[in-house]
Image: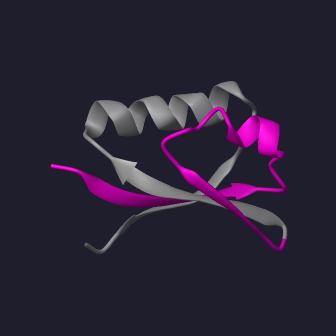
Amino acid sequence: MTMRYEFRVTGDVSPLMAEAFPELAAEPVPRQTLFFGSVTDEAHLSGLLARFQDLGLKVEEMRRLPG
């Protein structure tokens, strides 16, 4: 079952770096970048979090979105 998630990352993430997350949309907000999109399962979620960490991006908040 696919779920929608939002990830709040510290700072402005460049468009080139955001391309590392093709399954997520990126939207800059003051002092953060929001990534959001569909996550297929726990393994996919874990992989996304590992990818953020591997790229040196700090996830400040992660939440499941309704619907």
On the image, the x and y values in percent for residue 65 come to 36, 70
Q: Which residue is at the front of the view, 22 or 47?
A: 22
Residue 5 lies in magenta, yes or no?
yes
In this picture, which residue range is highlighted in magenta?
1-30
Colouring used for the render: one colour
- The answer to which image quadrant residue 32 occupies is bottom right
Q: Which residue is at the front of the view, 30 or 17?
A: 17
Residue 12 lies in magenta, yes or no?
yes
Residue sitting at 49 percent across and 36 percent down? 48
- The answer to which image quadrant residue 51 occupies is top right
Q: How many marks?
A: 0
Q: Does 48 appear above or below 7?
A: above
Residue sitting at 35 percent across and 60 percent down? 4
On the image, the x and y values in percent for residue 7 come to 55, 57
Q: Does 25 appear above or below 66?
A: above
On the image, the x and y values in percent for residue 35 come to 59, 56
Residue sitting at 58 percent across and 38 percent down? 21
Residue sitting at 35 percent across and 34 percent down? 44
Q: Which residue is at the front of the view, 19 or 50?
A: 19
On the image, the x and y values in percent for residue 59 come to 63, 50
> Is 23 placed left or right of 57 in the picture?
left
Q: Does 41 appear above or below 47?
A: below
